[in-house]
Every structure is written in C-alpha cells, then in structure tokens.
Image: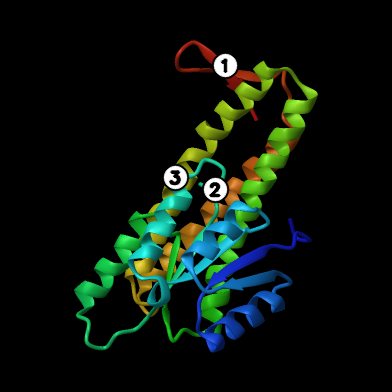
Amino acid sequence: MGTRRFTALIVDSDRDSVDIIGMVLNGMGHRFRCVKSVQDAKSAVENGEVDLAIIDLALAGREGVEFCKWIKQEKALEFLPILVLTTLEEDKHLVERIRDRLEALENGADEYLTKPFLMHDLKGRLSVLLRIRGLYLDLMDAQSRIIKAEKAQVAEQLGGAACHKIGQPLTSMKLNLHLIATLDPSDSKYKEALEALRRDINAIASIVEKMKSADPERQEPYPGGKKILDF
C-alpha cells in the first residue's frame, strides 16, 4: 500500500481552498481533480477512479449532505471515504455547529473539517481516510486472489471471516471518528480518540496481511452451522 497513489475528488468553488488541498495531496504523492457542483461530482464518482471525496458544504449545502447519503447507499461506492468541509460561522452557536457536524456524519461523511484549517490537521485527516481506503482496496485484492484460486465456498468463508474479525475495529473506528468531529483538538479525549483510531487501523492492517496468506484448510465454526477461515 505504501506505493499506492490515490485520486481525490474535490467539490469546491473556492480556488484558494482547492489549491491548498491540492498542494497537500500532491505533497503526499496523490492526485486530485476538482468539480464545482454536486451533479458533476456524481458523474465523476460514478465513472470511477476516485478514492476520496472532499466536499465543501458552503458550496453544496443540503445537496452536499444528500450527496454523502447517496454515496453510502450505492453498493459500489459505500466504502468511498468522504471528508466534509464547512466555513466557520461566527454567528452560529456551538450547539448548532455540532449538530451540523453530526448531520453530515450521520448521512455518510467519515470526517469533518472547518475552514480555515491548519495544513497539518488537513494532512492528518487525509492520511487516516486514505489509509482506510488503502486497507479496503487491499482487502478487495486479497479477496479477489482467493476467489480466483479457490472454490466459491472458500470465498464465502473468507468473507465471513473478514466480517467477523474486522467488524469490531471498524465499528470502533466509526465511533472514534464521530467523537473526533465533536471535540476540540486541545481536548485530551481528542488525542485518545486519535490513538484508538490508529490502533484499530493497525489491527485491520494486521488482519488483511493474515488474509493474504490464509490457509483454506484452517476453518472455525460460525453461527448458523457455517464455517469461516481461521487466520
């Protein structure tokens, strides 16, 4: 995954913002493309070659939230990570800001960042989301190799094992992402949530590595009278 080069889609009409995000992505060795409407964003995502969607709610508003929801409802796109951007509105009460964040997260956004943002904050969030994307693609690659090499039964056993073993850290990651979105970076709980997120990412990475060399002969019982691969 270290040599994988990702492509991000930026949905934003703010040239300065696009330039900053693009500079950070390029500095990380990744590509990006930019569109200025949700409709164009949908077309770009449906055409593939997008590993991360970055959308500015100041541009898209409610339509942007619906865009997040649409992505997560599409079977082929449900694991596409989404970073939502919004402009800090001084006249908005803190409770309203948190409510806005939660609405975006509950409708499919995976991370939330308020403008103006620090470059290291942006890079940190991009790193986490692209790492998760890479793990997902590695998982798909491993699954594909197994499917080609083994019978359909083995593929089913691998899928069951993946759901069984990865489900818990994925649930934990989602909870910590929600928590991070509501905390101030200076809060000690913010750092604790980040550390927990890193641990879960490493746990999934370890599981994916084990999946690459999974032995079809090693199986364990699974509810419903089925068996899954043991690795």
Q: Give the residue displayed 67% in from the left and 64% down from the top.
A: 7
Q: CA distance from mark 3 to mark 2?
A: 8 Å
At label 3, counting other C-alpha atoms closer than 10 Å, the crowd grade (few under 14, some 14-19, many 20 or more) is: some
Disc 1 on helix, strand or loop?
strand
Badge 3 vs badge 2, beta-carbon distance below 8 Å: no
The answer to whether residue 156 is left or right of residue 54 is right
Disc 3 on helix, strand or loop?
helix
Q: Quadrant of the N terminus?
A: bottom right
Q: CA distance from mark 3 to mark 1?
A: 29 Å
According to the picture, the residue beneath numbered tag 2 turns out to be: 77
The answer to whether residue 51 is left or right of residue 114 is right
Q: Quadrant of the C terminus?
A: top right
The amino acid type, in three-letter code, at marker 1 is Lys
According to the picture, the residue beneath numbered tag 3 turns out to be: 73
According to the picture, the residue beneath numbered tag 1 turns out to be: 227
The amino acid type, in three-letter code, at marker 2 is Leu
Q: CA distance from mark 2 to mark 1?
A: 29 Å
